[in-house]
Image (spheres, rainbow, N blue to C red):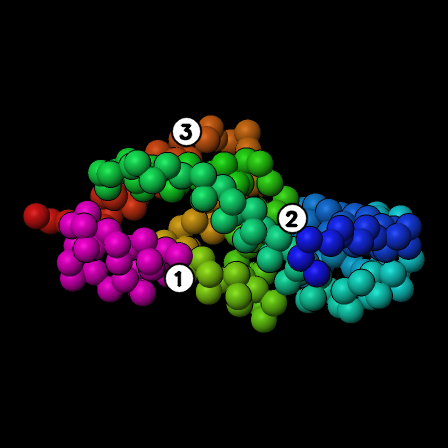
Amino acid sequence: MEGQPQKLPNARQRSQIETRTRLLDVAAHLFAKDGCNKTTTKNLASQAGVAVGTVYLHFGDKDTLLQELLKTAISHLKQEMGKISPGETDGFSLVQAKMNGLANFARRFPALAAVLFDPVNLASPAGQDAANFLTKSQENGLMAGISAGYYRGDLHSGLAARALVGILVQILGWWARNPQAASQTEIVEILTELRMNGLKSQG
């Protein structure tokens, strides 16, 4: 009840929490490196230092584990996007700030970003919620941009949102796995240019 001290987890509960966290961390790196389909439960358990049955105890199957990883990735992504300054007013600066937020997420959480921006994962039943979130967030941004005159008024926002998600998946997923291949500045620049010049208002 409100005002009463929170009951702290006991030793067994803390151990379960630590095991679950370790499994998620190991799974993120294995899924990013080898893909979900090629990662076996046996290898996951071995890398995490637990029995195979422990994986099933915590997650049931790999699809559930993937879904949990995607939820975690989206949570971190939202946190990074939440840091964007609301003071950005012109279209270019606002889009640039959003692209920088996406890039910050990929730089800070490369394994989670590689898992999130994997087309195979997003196309799976476990990835549908994440795919829908990415598409809807892009569509909302496009609709706001259309209203503000940054983008073409005849733009099909739903179709354009899916195209943009495809671009983000390809570029950020690749960069998360190959951070040495391009600087964050270069990533943000190309994403901003594609967004602004590819969809800009003709007025």
Judge whether 195 appears above or below 159 on screen: above
The three-letter code of the residue at mark 3 reads Thr
The three-letter code of the residue at mark 2 reads Ala
Provide the residue span drawn in magenta: 136-162
> Residue at the spot x=36%, y=55% of the render?
138
**Does the stretch in magenta take in 147?**
yes
Nearer the observer, 66 or 146: 146
Q: CA distance from mark 3 to mark 1?
A: 26 Å
User: Around disc 1, counting alpha carbons within 10 Å, would you say few (fewer than 14), some (14 to 19), or many (20 or more)?
Assistant: some
Nearer the observer, 73 or 32: 73
**Does the stretch in magenta take in 157?**
yes
Residue 126: x and y in percent read 61, 67
Residue 64: x and y in percent read 69, 66
Q: CA distance from mark 3 to mark 2?
A: 23 Å
Mark 3, residue position: 185
Q: Earlier in the sequence, mark 3 or mark 1?
A: 1
For residue 29, side relative to residue 170 (left or right): right
> Residue at the spot x=22%, y=38% of the render?
90
User: Quadrant of the rendered structure where residue 88 is?
Assistant: top left
User: For numbered disc 1, what is the local secondary structure?
Assistant: helix
Q: Earlier in the sequence, mark 3 or mark 2?
A: 2
User: Around disc 2, counting alpha carbons within 10 Å, would you say few (fewer than 14), some (14 to 19), or many (20 or more)?
Assistant: many
Q: Earlier in the sequence, mark 1 or mark 2?
A: 2
Nearer the observer, 132 or 2: 2
Q: Disc 1 vs disc 2: which is toward the camera? A: 1
Mark 1, residue position: 136
The answer to whether any part of residue 141 appears in the image is yes
Q: CA distance from mark 1 to mark 2?
A: 24 Å
The three-letter code of the residue at mark 1 reads Lys
Mark 2, residue position: 32
User: For numbered disc 3, what is the local secondary structure?
Assistant: helix
